[in-house]
Image: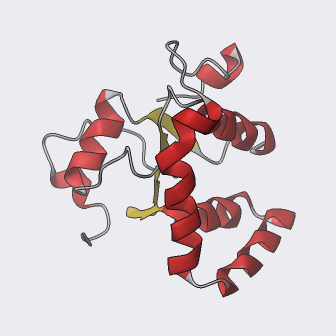
Amino acid sequence: MTKAPYSYRDDPAVPRFDDSKPLFIFDNVCVLCSGGVSFIMKHDHKGLINFTSAQGELGDAIARHYAVDWDDTYLFLRNGKLTTKSDGYFEVARELGGWWKVFLLFRVVPRPLRDWVYDMVARHRYRWFGKTEIACELLTEDQKARLI
């Protein structure tokens, strides 16, 4: 579903938050997802990206606003626009800049193929990588402090 940029600001169900930085919304009980967020945080030395749990109030409200099942994909909100799946990771690379932009070369792979691979991993992520009962277990205390 395509919505106007920043349309969530007019949705009373979406809590107010600092959207001056991109927001990465992830499944915090998924070992792969939390590990991926930990990896991004370690390489986001300038603190360019904010993070929140899909299971939390903000993450869930944004998913509902955009009519996206967060269980199918993480969400990346940048400049008021939502991206998901493989395109979202390209936006993360673009935001981090520097040598991370090399990953943008993979955009030559057709999106249906990229998203098919993404969907396959997402569908099996708990079985292949595990699930934790402790939210964001793989994040350090400093990383947990970066969550909104």
- Depth check: give the residue in front, 41 or 47: 41
14 horizontally vs 141: left or right: left
Residue placed at 62% from the left, 37% from the top?
128
- Depth check: give the residue in front, 20 or 60: 60
68 horizontally vs 90: left or right: left
Residue placed at 38% from the left, 44% from the top?
71
Q: Residue 135: tell me if it is visible.
A: yes
Considering only vertical position in the picture, is 82 above or below 146?
A: below
Q: What percent of the width, then of the height, locates residue 82?
A: 40, 62
Considering only vertical position in the picture, is 76 above or below 141?
A: below
Q: Residue 21: tell me if it is visible.
A: no
Q: What percent of the width, then of the height, locates residue 14?
A: 22, 41
Location of residue 4 by image quarter:
bottom left
- Depth check: give the residue in front, 103 or 131: 131
Residue placed at 42% from the left, 41% from the top?
18
Considering only vertical position in the picture, is 30 above or below 2?
A: above
Q: Looking at this rendering, what residue extends furthest in the right direction? A: 99
Q: What percent of the width, then of the height, locates residue 142?
A: 70, 19
81 horizontally vs 117: left or right: left
Residue placed at 47% from the left, 34% from the top?
52
Q: What percent of the width, then of the height, locates residue 85?
A: 50, 61
Q: Looking at this rendering, what residue extends furthest in the left direction? A: 12
Colour style of the rendered protein structure: secondary structure
83 horizontally vs 42: left or right: left
